[in-house]
Image (spheres, helix red, strand yellow):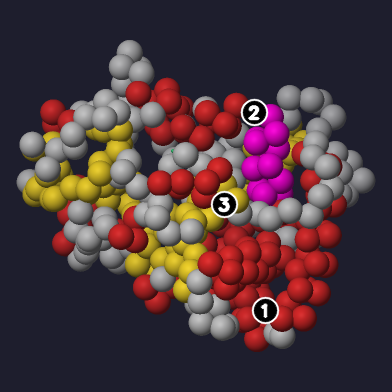
Amino acid sequence: MTAVPVTIATRGDSPRVDTVRVNMRAHLESHAAAMVAAVARYDAASRQEQRKIVAEIRARHAAMRPLVGLAPNATNLALPGETNQKLAKNAAFTLGYTGSPSTSSRVVVDWIGSPMRIVFDSCSWSGQCSRYCVLKGGRGKFSSVRAGRSWRDLVAYRDPVGWIIARRHELVTAADRHGAVLERGDVGTEYGIADLVPGLYADTPTGSTVRGYDYGKRPHILTGNGWQANGHHRTVYSWNENSDPRAVNRFLARGGNVVVVTDAAKGDPIPSSWKIGSKSWPTVDGDATDDRLADPGGHVVILYAKGGAANPIRPLTGFVMPVARGGRS
Ligand code: SF4
Protein backbone atom coordinates (compact mmCIF):
# COMPACT_ATOMS: atom_id res chain seq x y z
CA MET A 1 0.00 0.00 0.00
CA THR A 2 1.48 3.33 -1.04
CA ALA A 3 1.41 6.49 1.03
CA VAL A 4 -1.41 8.92 0.33
CA PRO A 5 0.03 12.45 0.25
CA VAL A 6 -3.12 14.42 0.95
CA THR A 7 -5.83 12.86 3.03
CA ILE A 8 -8.51 14.25 5.27
CA ALA A 9 -9.85 11.59 7.60
CA THR A 10 -13.41 12.21 8.71
CA ARG A 11 -16.22 10.06 9.90
CA GLY A 12 -18.36 8.91 7.01
CA ASP A 13 -22.12 8.75 6.91
CA SER A 14 -21.96 5.25 8.39
CA PRO A 15 -20.59 5.22 11.95
CA ARG A 16 -18.54 2.13 11.08
CA VAL A 17 -16.77 3.40 7.96
CA ASP A 18 -14.03 6.03 7.97
CA THR A 19 -13.73 8.23 4.91
CA VAL A 20 -10.42 9.12 3.29
CA ARG A 21 -10.35 11.89 0.72
CA VAL A 22 -7.60 11.57 -1.89
CA ASN A 23 -6.35 14.46 -3.99
CA MET A 24 -5.60 12.46 -7.11
CA ARG A 25 -3.24 14.95 -8.73
CA ALA A 26 -1.12 15.08 -5.55
CA HIS A 27 -1.24 11.30 -5.29
CA LEU A 28 -0.03 10.83 -8.87
CA GLU A 29 2.62 13.52 -8.44
CA SER A 30 4.08 11.50 -5.58
CA HIS A 31 4.41 8.52 -7.95
CA ALA A 32 5.59 10.45 -11.02
CA ALA A 33 9.21 9.26 -10.96
CA ALA A 34 8.16 5.60 -10.71
CA MET A 35 5.64 6.06 -13.53
CA VAL A 36 8.22 7.75 -15.80
CA ALA A 37 10.66 4.87 -15.21
CA ALA A 38 7.91 2.29 -15.80
CA VAL A 39 6.95 3.76 -19.19
CA ALA A 40 10.63 3.77 -20.23
CA ARG A 41 10.97 0.10 -19.18
CA TYR A 42 7.80 -0.82 -21.08
CA ASP A 43 9.03 0.92 -24.25
CA ALA A 44 12.39 -0.86 -24.05
CA ALA A 45 10.85 -4.33 -23.58
CA SER A 46 10.25 -6.80 -26.41
CA ARG A 47 6.68 -7.24 -27.67
CA GLN A 48 6.52 -10.58 -25.90
CA GLU A 49 7.69 -9.07 -22.60
CA GLN A 50 5.24 -6.17 -22.99
CA ARG A 51 2.34 -8.56 -23.43
CA LYS A 52 3.39 -10.58 -20.36
CA ILE A 53 3.76 -7.44 -18.20
CA VAL A 54 0.39 -6.08 -19.32
CA ALA A 55 -1.42 -9.42 -18.82
CA GLU A 56 -0.28 -9.44 -15.18
CA ILE A 57 -1.30 -5.82 -14.68
CA ARG A 58 -4.72 -6.39 -16.26
CA ALA A 59 -5.35 -9.37 -14.02
CA ARG A 60 -4.65 -7.14 -10.98
CA HIS A 61 -6.93 -4.45 -12.30
CA ALA A 62 -9.69 -6.91 -13.16
CA ALA A 63 -9.63 -8.10 -9.54
CA MET A 64 -10.55 -4.56 -8.42
CA ARG A 65 -13.71 -4.41 -10.53
CA PRO A 66 -15.99 -6.30 -8.10
CA LEU A 67 -15.24 -3.55 -5.52
CA VAL A 68 -17.38 -1.23 -7.66
CA GLY A 69 -19.93 -3.84 -8.65
CA LEU A 70 -18.45 -4.87 -12.02
CA ALA A 71 -17.53 -8.33 -13.29
CA PRO A 72 -13.79 -9.09 -12.95
CA ASN A 73 -13.08 -8.82 -16.68
CA ALA A 74 -9.75 -7.64 -18.07
CA THR A 75 -10.72 -4.54 -20.06
CA ASN A 76 -9.10 -1.43 -21.44
CA LEU A 77 -8.95 1.77 -19.40
CA ALA A 78 -9.43 4.17 -22.33
CA LEU A 79 -12.44 3.84 -24.61
CA PRO A 80 -12.66 4.43 -28.37
CA GLY A 81 -13.91 7.90 -29.26
CA GLU A 82 -17.02 6.61 -30.99
CA THR A 83 -18.48 5.86 -27.56
CA ASN A 84 -18.39 9.60 -26.77
CA GLN A 85 -20.59 11.97 -28.79
CA LYS A 86 -18.00 14.74 -28.74
CA LEU A 87 -14.92 12.63 -29.49
CA ALA A 88 -16.76 10.88 -32.32
CA LYS A 89 -16.49 14.17 -34.25
CA ASN A 90 -12.69 13.92 -34.40
CA ALA A 91 -11.30 12.88 -37.79
CA ALA A 92 -8.29 11.12 -36.20
CA PHE A 93 -8.73 7.80 -34.39
CA THR A 94 -9.28 8.93 -30.81
CA LEU A 95 -9.30 7.27 -27.41
CA GLY A 96 -10.89 8.89 -24.38
CA TYR A 97 -9.83 8.37 -20.78
CA THR A 98 -12.69 9.13 -18.39
CA GLY A 99 -12.68 9.18 -14.60
CA SER A 100 -15.26 10.37 -12.08
CA PRO A 101 -15.73 14.14 -12.01
CA SER A 102 -15.05 16.19 -8.90
CA THR A 103 -15.68 14.12 -5.74
CA SER A 104 -18.52 12.05 -7.16
CA SER A 105 -16.70 8.73 -6.76
CA ARG A 106 -16.85 6.92 -3.43
CA VAL A 107 -15.55 3.39 -3.15
CA VAL A 108 -15.57 1.28 0.00
CA VAL A 109 -12.56 -1.03 0.33
CA ASP A 110 -11.27 -3.28 3.08
CA TRP A 111 -7.51 -3.48 2.64
CA ILE A 112 -6.45 -3.09 6.25
CA GLY A 113 -8.93 -5.27 8.09
CA SER A 114 -11.57 -2.58 8.53
CA PRO A 115 -13.70 -0.94 5.84
CA MET A 116 -12.67 2.47 4.52
CA ARG A 117 -14.52 4.73 2.10
CA ILE A 118 -12.31 6.50 -0.44
CA VAL A 119 -13.52 9.76 -1.97
CA PHE A 120 -11.50 10.62 -5.05
CA ASP A 121 -10.96 14.35 -5.54
CA SER A 122 -10.36 14.08 -9.29
CA CYS A 123 -10.31 17.70 -10.39
CA SER A 124 -9.25 19.80 -7.43
CA TRP A 125 -9.34 23.05 -9.42
CA SER A 126 -13.04 22.71 -10.14
CA GLY A 127 -15.32 25.39 -8.73
CA GLN A 128 -18.75 26.41 -9.92
CA CYS A 129 -18.52 23.92 -12.77
CA SER A 130 -18.76 21.00 -10.34
CA ARG A 131 -22.38 21.92 -9.52
CA TYR A 132 -23.57 21.24 -13.05
CA CYS A 133 -20.73 19.19 -14.50
CA VAL A 134 -21.80 17.75 -17.83
CA LEU A 135 -20.10 14.47 -16.92
CA LYS A 136 -22.68 13.93 -14.18
CA GLY A 137 -25.50 13.99 -16.73
CA GLY A 138 -25.95 12.09 -19.99
CA ARG A 139 -24.34 8.65 -19.82
CA GLY A 140 -23.03 9.59 -16.38
CA LYS A 141 -26.51 8.85 -15.02
CA PHE A 142 -26.08 5.12 -15.71
CA SER A 143 -24.75 3.19 -12.73
CA SER A 144 -22.62 0.95 -14.98
CA VAL A 145 -20.92 4.02 -16.50
CA ARG A 146 -20.30 5.50 -13.05
CA ALA A 147 -18.93 2.16 -11.85
CA GLY A 148 -16.50 2.03 -14.79
CA ARG A 149 -15.22 5.49 -13.91
CA SER A 150 -14.85 4.56 -10.24
CA TRP A 151 -12.89 1.47 -11.26
CA ARG A 152 -10.44 3.65 -13.22
CA ASP A 153 -10.12 6.02 -10.21
CA LEU A 154 -9.41 3.06 -7.97
CA VAL A 155 -6.82 1.61 -10.34
CA ALA A 156 -5.01 4.97 -10.65
CA TYR A 157 -4.99 5.30 -6.86
CA ARG A 158 -4.07 1.76 -5.88
CA ASP A 159 -1.65 0.90 -8.71
CA PRO A 160 -0.38 4.07 -10.39
CA VAL A 161 2.57 2.29 -12.01
CA GLY A 162 0.39 -0.50 -13.43
CA TRP A 163 -2.17 2.11 -14.47
CA ILE A 164 0.33 4.13 -16.48
CA ILE A 165 1.78 1.03 -18.15
CA ALA A 166 -1.72 -0.14 -19.11
CA ARG A 167 -2.50 3.30 -20.55
CA ARG A 168 0.78 3.38 -22.47
CA HIS A 169 0.11 -0.11 -23.82
CA GLU A 170 -3.35 0.91 -25.04
CA LEU A 171 -1.91 3.95 -26.83
CA VAL A 172 0.95 1.98 -28.39
CA THR A 173 -1.35 -0.82 -29.52
CA ALA A 174 -3.91 1.58 -31.03
CA ALA A 175 -1.24 3.71 -32.73
CA ASP A 176 0.46 0.69 -34.25
CA ARG A 177 -2.90 -0.64 -35.47
CA HIS A 178 -4.21 2.65 -36.91
CA GLY A 179 -0.91 4.33 -37.79
CA ALA A 180 -1.64 7.13 -35.32
CA VAL A 181 -3.71 7.72 -32.21
CA LEU A 182 -5.04 10.80 -30.48
CA GLU A 183 -6.08 10.61 -26.84
CA ARG A 184 -8.36 12.95 -24.96
CA GLY A 185 -7.16 12.40 -21.42
CA ASP A 186 -8.77 13.81 -18.31
CA VAL A 187 -12.42 13.54 -19.27
CA GLY A 188 -13.98 14.17 -15.85
CA THR A 189 -10.62 14.53 -14.11
CA GLU A 190 -7.67 16.88 -13.98
CA TYR A 191 -4.64 14.68 -13.34
CA GLY A 192 -2.53 16.59 -15.89
CA ILE A 193 -0.67 13.36 -16.59
CA ALA A 194 1.29 14.80 -19.55
CA ASP A 195 3.01 17.16 -17.06
CA LEU A 196 4.00 14.23 -14.91
CA VAL A 197 4.73 11.44 -17.43
CA PRO A 198 5.52 13.02 -20.81
CA GLY A 199 6.59 9.62 -22.18
CA LEU A 200 2.96 8.48 -22.14
CA TYR A 201 2.52 10.45 -25.36
CA ALA A 202 5.83 9.62 -27.06
CA ASP A 203 5.58 7.96 -30.47
CA THR A 204 5.61 4.18 -30.28
CA PRO A 205 8.89 2.24 -30.33
CA THR A 206 8.05 1.31 -33.96
CA GLY A 207 7.46 4.96 -34.90
CA SER A 208 3.64 5.26 -34.95
CA THR A 209 2.28 8.66 -33.94
CA VAL A 210 0.86 9.23 -30.45
CA ARG A 211 -0.69 12.58 -29.54
CA GLY A 212 -2.91 13.80 -26.70
CA TYR A 213 -4.89 16.76 -25.45
CA ASP A 214 -7.08 17.78 -22.57
CA TYR A 215 -8.64 20.79 -20.89
CA GLY A 216 -7.55 22.08 -17.49
CA LYS A 217 -7.94 24.81 -14.89
CA ARG A 218 -4.72 24.45 -12.89
CA PRO A 219 -3.11 27.88 -12.84
CA HIS A 220 0.39 26.68 -13.68
CA ILE A 221 -0.78 25.82 -17.21
CA LEU A 222 -0.75 29.58 -17.77
CA THR A 223 3.00 29.83 -17.20
CA GLY A 224 3.72 28.08 -20.52
CA ASN A 225 1.83 27.80 -23.79
CA GLY A 226 -0.13 24.61 -23.06
CA TRP A 227 2.18 22.27 -24.96
CA GLN A 228 3.82 19.41 -23.08
CA ALA A 229 5.45 16.07 -23.82
CA ASN A 230 7.84 17.53 -26.42
CA GLY A 231 4.96 18.99 -28.39
CA HIS A 232 2.91 15.77 -28.39
CA HIS A 233 0.27 16.98 -25.95
CA ARG A 234 -1.68 20.18 -25.55
CA THR A 235 -3.68 21.39 -22.57
CA VAL A 236 -6.28 24.02 -23.36
CA TYR A 237 -6.84 26.29 -20.37
CA SER A 238 -10.47 26.40 -19.17
CA TRP A 239 -11.69 29.86 -18.29
CA ASN A 240 -13.38 29.89 -14.89
CA GLU A 241 -14.50 32.22 -12.12
CA ASN A 242 -10.98 32.30 -10.62
CA SER A 243 -9.11 33.13 -13.83
CA ASP A 244 -6.73 36.07 -13.88
CA PRO A 245 -7.36 37.90 -17.19
CA ARG A 246 -3.76 39.25 -17.37
CA ALA A 247 -2.24 35.78 -16.95
CA VAL A 248 -4.71 34.36 -19.48
CA ASN A 249 -3.82 37.07 -22.02
CA ARG A 250 -0.10 36.38 -21.59
CA PHE A 251 -0.80 32.67 -22.15
CA LEU A 252 -2.74 33.44 -25.34
CA ALA A 253 0.04 35.74 -26.54
CA ARG A 254 2.50 32.83 -26.16
CA GLY A 255 0.29 30.68 -28.40
CA GLY A 256 -1.79 28.99 -25.71
CA ASN A 257 -5.49 28.39 -26.26
CA VAL A 258 -8.34 29.03 -23.84
CA VAL A 259 -11.76 27.43 -23.81
CA VAL A 260 -14.79 29.46 -22.72
CA VAL A 261 -18.18 27.95 -21.93
CA THR A 262 -20.78 30.46 -23.13
CA ASP A 263 -24.51 30.98 -22.89
CA ALA A 264 -24.78 30.59 -26.69
CA ALA A 265 -27.49 28.15 -27.79
CA LYS A 266 -26.57 24.98 -29.65
CA GLY A 267 -26.24 25.76 -33.36
CA ASP A 268 -25.80 29.54 -32.87
CA PRO A 269 -22.96 31.01 -34.95
CA ILE A 270 -19.99 31.63 -32.68
CA PRO A 271 -18.64 35.16 -32.21
CA SER A 272 -15.65 35.90 -34.47
CA SER A 273 -13.62 37.26 -31.55
CA TRP A 274 -13.68 37.06 -27.76
CA LYS A 275 -12.59 39.77 -25.36
CA ILE A 276 -10.59 39.05 -22.23
CA GLY A 277 -9.67 42.12 -20.21
CA SER A 278 -8.76 44.72 -22.82
CA LYS A 279 -7.67 42.27 -25.53
CA SER A 280 -9.69 40.51 -28.23
CA TRP A 281 -8.73 37.10 -29.57
CA PRO A 282 -9.87 35.12 -32.63
CA THR A 283 -12.13 32.15 -31.94
CA VAL A 284 -12.67 28.57 -33.00
CA ASP A 285 -15.87 26.54 -32.66
CA GLY A 286 -15.11 23.98 -29.97
CA ASP A 287 -18.26 22.00 -30.70
CA ALA A 288 -17.47 21.35 -34.38
CA THR A 289 -14.84 18.80 -33.33
CA ASP A 290 -12.99 18.00 -30.11
CA ASP A 291 -9.56 17.77 -31.77
CA ARG A 292 -7.82 20.62 -29.99
CA LEU A 293 -4.42 19.88 -31.52
CA ALA A 294 -5.72 21.09 -34.86
CA ASP A 295 -6.53 24.61 -33.56
CA PRO A 296 -4.15 27.47 -34.33
CA GLY A 297 -2.49 29.03 -31.28
CA GLY A 298 -3.66 32.21 -29.61
CA HIS A 299 -7.35 31.37 -30.06
CA VAL A 300 -10.36 31.21 -27.76
CA VAL A 301 -12.32 27.98 -28.13
CA ILE A 302 -16.05 28.68 -27.84
CA LEU A 303 -18.40 26.06 -26.38
CA TYR A 304 -22.10 26.29 -25.68
CA ALA A 305 -23.14 25.32 -22.14
CA LYS A 306 -24.56 21.85 -21.78
CA GLY A 307 -26.59 19.99 -19.20
CA GLY A 308 -27.44 21.88 -16.01
CA ALA A 309 -25.00 24.68 -16.86
CA ALA A 310 -27.28 25.65 -19.76
CA ASN A 311 -30.23 26.28 -17.44
CA PRO A 312 -30.90 30.04 -17.64
CA ILE A 313 -32.57 30.18 -14.24
CA ARG A 314 -29.36 28.96 -12.58
CA PRO A 315 -26.65 31.10 -14.19
CA LEU A 316 -23.08 30.42 -13.08
CA THR A 317 -21.31 33.72 -12.80
CA GLY A 318 -17.78 33.47 -14.10
CA PHE A 319 -17.99 29.91 -15.45
CA VAL A 320 -20.69 30.23 -18.12
CA MET A 321 -19.86 33.51 -19.88
CA PRO A 322 -22.51 35.61 -21.61
CA VAL A 323 -21.77 36.04 -25.32
CA ALA A 324 -22.97 39.63 -24.93
CA ARG A 325 -20.05 40.28 -22.57
CA GLY A 326 -17.09 38.68 -24.35
CA GLY A 327 -18.14 38.07 -27.92
CA ARG A 328 -17.87 40.23 -31.03
CA SER A 329 -19.58 39.14 -34.26
S1 SF4 B 1 -16.45 20.55 -15.51
FE1 SF4 B 1 -14.42 19.57 -15.49
S2 SF4 B 1 -13.37 20.51 -13.72
FE2 SF4 B 1 -15.55 20.91 -13.48
S3 SF4 B 1 -16.33 19.23 -12.18
FE3 SF4 B 1 -16.64 18.61 -14.34
S4 SF4 B 1 -14.80 17.45 -14.86
FE4 SF4 B 1 -14.32 18.60 -13.00
Query: The residue tagged with tag 1: helix, strand or loop?
Result: helix
Q: Residues within 10 Å of mark 2 (few under 14, many from 20)?
A: few
In the rendered structure, does residue 301 fall within the stretch colored magenta?
Answer: no
The amino acid type found where label 1 is placed reads Tyr
Check disc 2 and report the residue beneath it. Answer: 142
Check disc 1 and report the residue beneath it. Answer: 42
Instruction: Indicate left or right for 282 with 29 as reference.
Output: left
> Considering depth in this image, is 77 or 68 the residue closer to the camera?
77
Indicate whether 116 appears above or below 234: above
Q: Position of residue 124 (x, y in %)?
A: 49, 45
> Considering depth in this image, is 14 or 285 the residue closer to the camera?
285
The amino acid type found where label 2 is placed reads Phe
Q: Position of residue 114 (x, y in %)?
A: 89, 41
Q: Are marks 2 and 3 in contact (CB under 8 Å)?
A: no
From the image, state whether disc 1 or disc 3 is nearer to you.
3
The amino acid type found where label 3 is placed reads Pro
Instruction: Indicate left or right for 273 with 209 as reference.
Output: left
Query: The residue tagged with tag 2: helix, strand or loop?
Result: loop
Which range of residues does the magenta coloring cover? 143-154
* Residue 22 visible to the viewer: yes
Question: Residue 80 bears which disc, if any?
Answer: 3
Residue shown at 38% from the left, 49% from the top:
290
Q: Position of residue 5 (x, y in %)?
A: 63, 57
First in sequence: mark 2 vs mark 1: 1
The C terminus lies in quadrant:
top left
